[in-house]
Image (spheres, grey):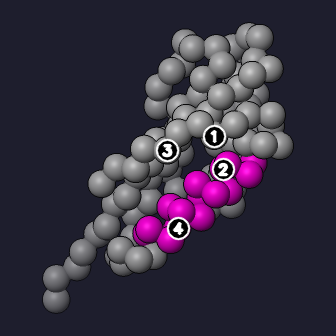
Amino acid sequence: MKRIMITLSAELTFYIPHANSLKDKRQVRRSLIDKTRQKYNVSVAEVGTQDILRTLTIGIAVVSGDVAHAQNSLDEIIRYMEKSAGGADAELTGVDRGL
């Protein structure tokens, strides 16, 4: 029996208007990543824009044996991160889904 592994990813971009220092940005990043890791068993990391003060780019990777489950999980995580960002005074401004 052949096994399949489905890997889906997304790159989320957030705008942090109140970030006046990299420390402010780190606080938002840490909160979003830690909460997401705690709630879901996924890989989450800052993947770009490290030196841009008010822009945060986070990558998410989901692995599953079922396409529908992977897609539903990724959709749920993106909604969760968007909601969590609002509590951290950040705004989700872009989602780029990879294959």
**Residue at the spot of label 1:** 92
Q: Percent position (x, y) of residue 91?
A: 69, 37
* Residue with the mark numbered 3: 95
Q: Residue at x 49, y 44 (%)?
A: 95
Dot placed on the residue nearer the N-terminal end, 3 or 4: 4
* Residue for point 73% across, 42% down: 85
Q: Quadrant of residue 88?
A: top right
Q: Which residue is mark 2?
A: 81
Question: Nearer the N terminus, badge 2 or badge 3?
Answer: 2
Marks 2 and 3 in Cβ contact (< 8 Å) = no
Q: Who's the residue at 67% across and 49% down the image?
A: 82
Which callout, 4 or 1, points at the residue further toward the start of the chain? 4
Along the horizontal axis of the image, is 28 left or right of 9? right
Of labels 1 and 2, the one closer to you: 1
Q: Is residue 82 above or below residue 14?
A: below
- Identify residue for label 4: 73
Q: Is residue 79 left or right of residue 1?
A: right
Q: Is residue 87 above or below residue 89?
A: below
- Tell me the SS state at disc 1: strand
Q: Which label sits in the foreground, 2 or 3?
A: 3
Which residue is pictured at 35% across the width and 74% down the height? 67
The reply to whether residue 14 is in sight is: yes
Distance between the alpha carbons at the discs numbered 2 and 3:
11 Å
